[in-house]
Amino acid sequence: MEVEATVTKVCPYCKEEIKVDAVKCKHCGEFIYKDSCQIVEQSTKSYVGTLILCAFLGSLGIHRFYVGKIGTGILMLITFGGFGIWALIDFIIVACCHFKDKKGRDIKP
Ligand SMILES: [Zn+2]
């Protein structure tokens, strides 16, 4: 009897146990990609940088320019961050790690 000491994971297609480093499921033959395991890609933008920009220049929308959201950045600039309210909401969202860059990736520390 073969003893397997390897760590296993569950195939996203057939729910059978497979080796954690497997690239192809031995049960159903589907290829396993790392991104099929529901890993949310993290933004390359700096969390601390976004937070600082939002705290000091939030009413000018600078943090939105920084993450690539140019359209809403300009809107924020001409409304002075929604008279401060929008900037405050953004700051809370950034602080809670729920702020996303233009590609929809979370900005986290
Ligand atoms: Zn499978």
Image (tube, rainbow, N blue to C red):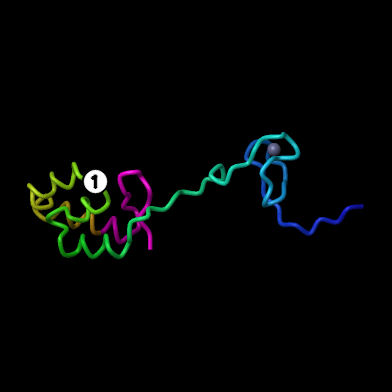
* Residue at 92% from the left image edge and 52% from the top image edge: 1
Q: Which quarter of the figure has residue 5?
A: bottom right
Query: How crowded is the residue under tag 1: few (<14 C-alpha within 10 Å), some, or many (20+)?
Result: some
Lateral position of residue 68 relative to residue 33, left or right: left
Instruction: Residue type at mark 1: give it.
Output: Lys
Query: Residue 20: x percent and y percent?
Result: 67, 52
Q: Secondary structure at mark 1?
A: loop
Considering only vertical position in the picture, is 43 above or below 56? Answer: above
Q: Determine whether the beta carbon of the residue marked 1 sits less than 8 angstroms from the nearest atom of ligand 1.
A: no
Residue shown at 62% from the left, 40% from the top: 12
Q: Main secondary structure of the magenta part?
A: loop
The stretch in magenta equals 92-109
Where ligand 1 lies, by quadrant? top right
Above or below residue 46? Residue 38 is: above
Q: Is residue 94 magenta?
A: yes
User: Is 10 positioned to the left or the right of 84 in the image?
Assistant: right
Residue to which mark 1 is pinned? 69
Indicate left or right for 28 with 39 as reference: right
Residue lying farthest to the right in this orientation: 1
Identify which residue, 90 or 44, lies in the foreground: 44
Q: Quadrant of residue 14?
A: top right
